[in-house]
Amino acid sequence: MTASALHSTLPPLGEEQRRHAAKVAALLHAEIARHGGWLSFEKFMELALYAPGLGYYSAGAVKIGAAGDFVTAPEVSDLFSRCMALQCAQVLGETGGDILELGAGTGRMAAGILAELHQQGQLPQRYLIVEVSADLAARQRQRIAHLPAILRERVSWLTQLPVAFTGVVLANEVADALPCRRVRLRAGQWQELGVSSVAAATAAGVAPDGSAGFIECARAADAQLRESCEALEHELPQPLPDDYETELCPRLTPWIAALCGALARGAILVCDYGLPRRHYYHPQRVRGTLVCHYRQRVHTDPYINPGVQDITAWVDFTRVAEAGDAAGMAVAGFVTQAAFLLGVGLPRLMEQLTDTVRRLQLAGEARRLLMPGEMGEAFKVMALTRGFDTPLLGTTQQDLRHLL
């Protein structure tokens, strides 16, 4: 599909969105100029998503849910949050402590987990949320405010990770939004893909074709990036073809290390769409995994609608496991989302329903969470533990660690 054909399938921007995209484009063009006419994709993605007051996650548009750009598992069904609560209950029953959620979206999972744990008689003392988006934090507070006092009084928001945390750390669809570097293998040499301005469109801010005046271009990878790419090649069972493009996320390692460093005892659950390394960097995946989300449409052009669309890349779960191992954590499980939900007890939750209409409704929601063509296999769950040796409920149905 050509770029123009791809753009024609997307809903048009509203006037407010056009103005916002133009402001973000102007910021990005200024950064490109400040860096000598070329900006790494990693920096482009960081600014497009997180520039204060302008980036996608920093501005005020609705992002998650049917009225937003994409739907997460907690928004698909409260069954996901209830299952996550059952897994938390198992860990907290042995370790005690609290729950820490990173990037809590609309707050729906937090509310669902607290409600289920209250019903189970296993409420944590605190439910902590670390959220980088002021807009999403406001939506979370609004949702939590409607909970009973015994639940809402346990919730608080942090600006940084706690120290010597005990309990469960939840990261649902967070790692995929970490800015990544994009690379290309051409004629046996690794190049880094970056962004330059289209001179004719710079003054206008937004080009007629919606590209916002950006053009992708490559330069030779620096020594550190080249070494990382070559090390990756040596790990893979098959050679990569010429003109192979993909992503590396160096930020993933220190991010996981920071989570592990904050955890004194308990479990970290990383839930996201991703793959083990040798599947992620498969020779047939010639254009990588980078995707954008806008108004429930998925496409592959990160250079349109800056600040108005989400940009994500799949997670290399081998890198997550390596970072956890280096931090002294046990890789306690690696499973598909479907296996995790079945292991924790989703069928039992369904069996408890006596209302036929409600059961049919939840059966449809469960299919979206479980089916391979929906979220069931693309999404994975990795568990990292410290001071907790009991097999996790969510890992009892499957063990994919041998693929890492």
Image (tube, grey):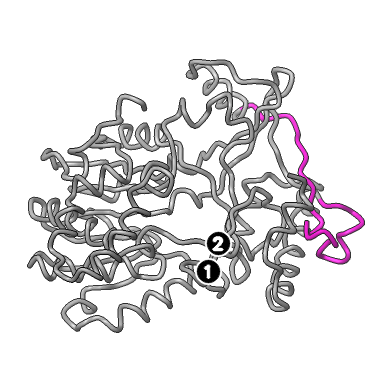
Q: Residue at x 48, y 69 (%)?
A: 66
Q: Is residue 8 left or right of residue 393?
A: right
Real-space Cα separation, disc 2 to disc 1, in angstroms:
7 Å
Q: Residue at x 48, y 72 (%)?
A: 134
Most extreme residue toward the right is 200
Q: Which residue is mark 1?
A: 68
The percent position of residue 213, horizontal first and vertical second, equals: 82, 56
Query: In which quadrant will I find the C terminus?
Result: top left
Q: Earlier in the sequence, mark 2 or mark 1?
A: 1
> What amino acid type is highlighted by mark number 2?
Gln
Foreground pick, 250 / 350: 350
Q: Is residue 141 left or right of residue 244?
A: left
Badge 1 density bin: few <14, some 14–19, many ≥20, Cα 10 Å: some
The percent position of residue 211, horizontal first and vertical second, equals: 78, 56
- Looking at the picture, does residue 153 appear above or below residue 125? below
- Looking at the picture, does residue 316 appear above or below residue 303? above
The percent position of residue 9, horizontal first and vertical second, equals: 70, 58
Q: Residue at x 46, y 41 (%)?
A: 315
Q: Which numbered disc, 2 or 1, marks the residue closer to the eye? A: 2
Choose top left, top right, bottom left or bottom right for residue 34.
Answer: bottom right
The percent position of residue 325, horizontal first and vertical second, equals: 30, 32
Q: Which residue is mark 2?
A: 296
> What amino acid type is highlighted by mark number 1?
Gly
Q: Are marks 2 and 1 in contact (CB under 8 Å)?
A: yes
Q: Is residue 231 magenta?
A: no
Q: Callout 2: helix, strand or loop?
A: loop
Q: Which residues are magenta?
A: 197-223
Foreground pick, 344 / 205: 344
Foreground pick, 326 / 356: 356
Q: Is residue 198 magenta?
A: yes
